[in-house]
Image (tube, helix red, strand yellow):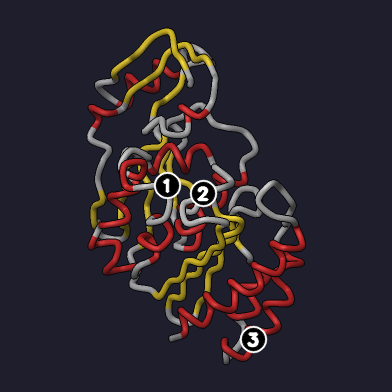
Amino acid sequence: MFSFSKFFLASSLEEAYSELLKNKKNIILGGTSYLRMGNTSWNTAIDLSNLNLNYILEKEDFISIGAMTTFRSLETNSLLKDYFGEIFNTALKDIIGVQFRTNVTVGATVFSKYGFSDLIPVLLALDSKVKLFNGGILTLESFLNESDIRRDILVEILIPKKVCKTSFQCVRKSKTDYSIINLAICKFDNSITIAVGSRPGKAILARKTMDIFNHSENIENEIINAMKYIGNEIPLDSNMRGSKSYRELLLAALLRKGIQEVLN
């Protein structure tokens, strides 16, 4: 169980950011579901609950998702379903249980760059951006590629507003366990985006595999070629859930299944 010396209920983002910078052991709280699994002591825990960051809104060019929005809200939201199909529901519905998903927040998961996340590959495949209080707007891909954790506050996720076909694929040892490997695919017009997570490691885009499909006049004819290629492109490794070679086999099979799903 994590602990903290002081609790700070922020009344504005400016106030929360100012408090965060006062001590390197100050921390922004999300749902705290994963923090509770650790045993770290913090100085000041900063709560954003009063800042109205729990929302999913349709704007002119983006779907905007507030940092305090829960997984359960993503899972059940009709606006996300209208634009992106069942990908959020499919990716999130088997994470632990409803009570857990009602507590876990989007902002804390993305900001922490969890390698085991089923959500981050989905957001990556949908070409999402992150809006930081101090750092402004940047692509999720570039944010994930940063090696250091910023002293900043994630305010919202911005997903380009486009109706697309999507697929989320994963393999778990049991229904509510973490994924051994996962994969998210988005097809918009004739363009394919593929993100791979739980490698184990932070989710990344399979750019060269995407090029195989995106430079082909017949995507279906390239599936076998892409299946052979993606395991060499994506860095995989072993951990307690599966070996590198097992993940290579799974990834190829999930790619085929996912591409066929978005083509139907």
**SS for tag 3?**
helix
Image coordinates of residue 210 in percent, x first then y, are: 61, 73
| Disc number placed over residue 222 in the picture, else none | 3
Identified by mark 3, the residue type is Glu
**How many marks can you see?**
3
**Alpha carbon distance from label 1 to label 2:** 12 Å
- Which of the pair 41/69 is nearer the observer? 41
- For label 2, the residue is 117
Identified by mark 2, the residue type is Ser
* Relative to 84, 116 lies left or right: right
Of circles 3 and 1, which is in front? 1
**SS for tag 2?**
loop
Write the residue at 37% across / 20% down.
Answer: 46
Identified by mark 1, the residue type is Ile
Q: Are marks 1 and 2 in contact (CB under 8 Å)?
A: no
Write the residue at 61% across / 41% down.
Answer: 146
Image coordinates of residue 87 in percent, x first then y, are: 39, 65
Image coordinates of residue 236 in percent, x first then y, are: 72, 56
Instruction: Categorize mark 1 by other alpha carbons within 10 Å: few (<14), some (14-19), many (20+).
Output: few
- For label 1, the residue is 96
| Disc number placed over residue 85 in the picture, else none | none
**SS for tag 1?**
loop
Vertical order, 43 against 31 (above or below): above
Q: Earlier in the sequence, mark 2 or mark 3?
A: 2
